[in-house]
Amino acid sequence: MEGKKKLVMQEKTIIDNITGVAKPGEITAIMGESGAGKTSLLNILSFRTKNSKICNIKGDVKLNN
């Protein structure tokens, strides 16, 4: 097929060196504009990535230490 382009994947760091604490009994909000990545962040934190072949997650998610 002519005109068919090959997709080249490049590594891109989305967030780096981030820490946070959610204490029991407190409400935490993730706010941002449409398309800012709120749902993507929650999917990564809950290990619900749609296509793990194109999404490589490095780091730790700790609960109760």
Image (cartoon, helix red, strand yellow):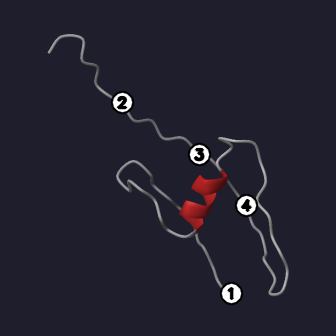
Q: In the depicted view, which residue is nearer to us: 30 or 55? A: 30
Mark 4 or mark 1, earlier in chain? 4
What residue appears at the point 29 percent right and 19 percent down from the top-left corner? 5
Q: Amino acid at mark 1?
A: Asn
The quadrant holding residue 62 is: bottom right
Q: Are marks 1 and 2 in contact (CB under 8 Å)?
A: no
In the figure, is residue 28 to the left or right of 11? Answer: right
Rendered residue at 59%/67% (across/down) = 45
Q: What separation in Å lies between label 1 and label 3 (alpha carbons)?
A: 25 Å
Q: Is 47 left, or right, of 60 in this rendering?
A: left
| Mark 3 and mark 4: Cα distance apart in space | 12 Å
Q: Which residue is mark 2?
A: 8
The local crowd at label 4, few if under 14, some if 14 to 19, many if 20 or more residues have their Cα within 10 Å, is: few
Numbered tag placed on residue 13 in the rendering: 3
| Tag of residue 18 | 4
Earlier sequence position, callout 3 versus callout 4:
3
